[in-house]
Image (cartoon, rainbow, N blue to C red):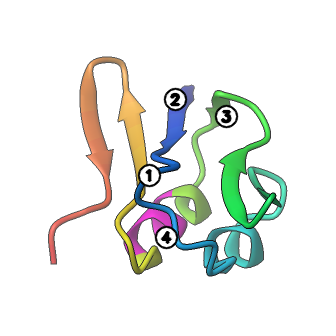
Amino acid sequence: MTWTVRVDAGLCMGSGICAGTAPEVFTLEEERARPREERVAARERVLEAADMCPAQAITVHDGTAVIGPRPD
């Protein structure tokens, strides 16, 4: 199973929390995060990174449904 991961560069603050939580999925480039690949293996750490993003710039999609960040 794979998910689609997107980072809204306009919202991203470059905190690096996502890259620290899931370095195999996210990287920092020019002070903004970006996914290393658009399609990623379904892993809990990907959702955790989306949940912890202070700017809520990360979205995780399972097909057409947004599954991350998860509601509080």
Distance from Cα at disc 4 to Cα at disc 1: 21 Å
Residue 50 within the magenta-colored segment of the rendering: yes
- Disc 3 marks which residue? 40
Circle 4: residue type: Glu
Q: Which residue is mark 1?
A: 10
Left or right: residue 10 compared with residue 69: right
**Which amino acid is tagged 2?**
Thr
The answer to whether the residues at label 2 and label 1 have Cβ atoms under 8 Å apart is no
Specify the segment rendered in magenta: 47-51
Could you say where residue 71 lies in the image, as x and y percent from the top left? 15, 67
Q: Is residue 53 above or below residue 26?
A: below
Q: Earlier in the sequence, mark 1 or mark 3?
A: 1
Q: Residues within 10 Å of mark 3 (few under 14, many from 20)?
A: some
Graded by Cα atoms within 10 Å as few (under 14), some (14 to 19) or many (20 or more), the crowding at tag 2 reads some
**Label located before the other in sequence (3 or 4):** 3
Tags 2 and 3 touching, CB below 8 Å: yes
Residue 36 image-quadrant placement = top right
Mark 4 vs mark 1, foreground winner is: 1
* Badge number at residue 4: 2
**What residue is disc 4 on?**
48
Residue drawn at the location 54% of the way across and 68% of the way down: 49
The reply to whether the magenta stretch includes residue 35 is no
Q: Is residue 40 left or right of residue 36?
A: left
Question: Disc 1 versus disc 3: distance between alpha carbons?
Answer: 22 Å
Does dot 2 land on a helix, a strand or a loop?
strand
